[in-house]
Amino acid sequence: MDLKTNIVLADDETLFRGVLKQMLESTGKFEVLFDAGNGAELIEKLAAAEKVDFPDIVLMDLKMPEMNGIEATKVITKKYPDLKVIALTTHKGKPFILNMLNLGAAGYITKDAEPDEMVQTINEVAAKGFYYSQEVLQIINGDFLNRNKKNSVSPLDPGFITKREKEVLLLLCQQFRTQEIAEKLFLSERTVEGHRNNLLSKTNSKNVVGLIVYGLQHEIIDISDLTDPINGI
């Protein structure tokens, strides 16, 4: 029997939370442990959940009273780094997407998305740690390209990121696991972890999402790299 992904919902609309819970649990893949009407209530319930069942994923609305989703995400990513936050919002604006991504959100879904897209995003985040749709990635990539042109960002020192680290970075961004990367590059898992830790340290990133941001910003990777298989590595 497959284990279900434990989810909590944070949204200020009670009816929406109820409908979303019913939809998610009807798939047989998810269990909604509890829900909250704002970020403060969510943080309180998470603290209580530490002693019982703890969630895998939070579906987080951004605009909520008392404590909004952005502020709640700041707290969660610091206090519960293994808890994945997926933004679920009506906002499609670039500033909202980039803000949540920079905070370490594992995914971003708009409320007009198809149910299958939402389920796919949750499944990908549960299995691999993060997932961003092509639409979101295009927005991110376009922002960084425009920002780089405007501010004339100087290129990296050629030796800052080594060739091997770039290979590991690309595979991490393609959501390969440590064991799979080790097999593809004919390295030990310990060596791969060493390269990964070096990348996190060099780029001042907290997680793979941060590495994606860095890779796009400095044109080490592009959108096609995040979906197309690597050939010849």
Image: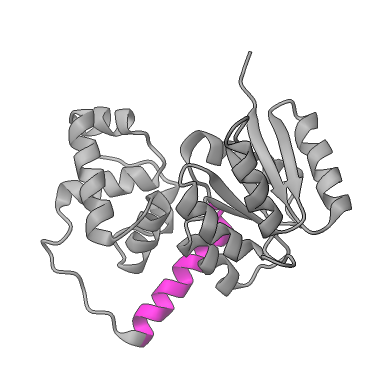
Could you tell me if residue 49 is visible in this image?
yes
Q: Is residue 26 left or right of residue 233?
A: right
Q: Quadrant of residue 27?
A: top right
Q: Is residue 148 above or below residue 113?
A: below
Q: How many marks?
A: 0
Dominant secondary structure, magenta: helix
Residue at x-position 47% and y-position 42%: 82
Q: Nearer the viewer, residue 193 or 46?
A: 46
Q: Nearer the viewer, residue 39 or 181?
A: 39
The magenta stretch spans residue 164: no
The magenta stretch spans residue 149: yes
**If the image is split into quadrants, where does the N terminus sit?**
top right
Counting from the top left corner in percent of width and height, residue 78 is at 46, 54
Counting from the top left corner in percent of width and height, residue 194 is at 19, 41
Point out the residue furthest to the right here.
15
What's drawn in magenta, residue-wise?
Answer: 132-150
Q: Nearer the viewer, residue 188 or 14?
A: 14
Residue at x-position 51% and y-position 33%: 127
Point out the residue furthest to the left here.
159
Counting from the top left corner in percent of width and height, residue 201 is at 24, 55
Counting from the top left corner in percent of width and height, residue 76 is at 53, 53
Q: Quadrant of residue 68?
A: bottom right
Could you tell me if residue 121 is visible in this image?
no
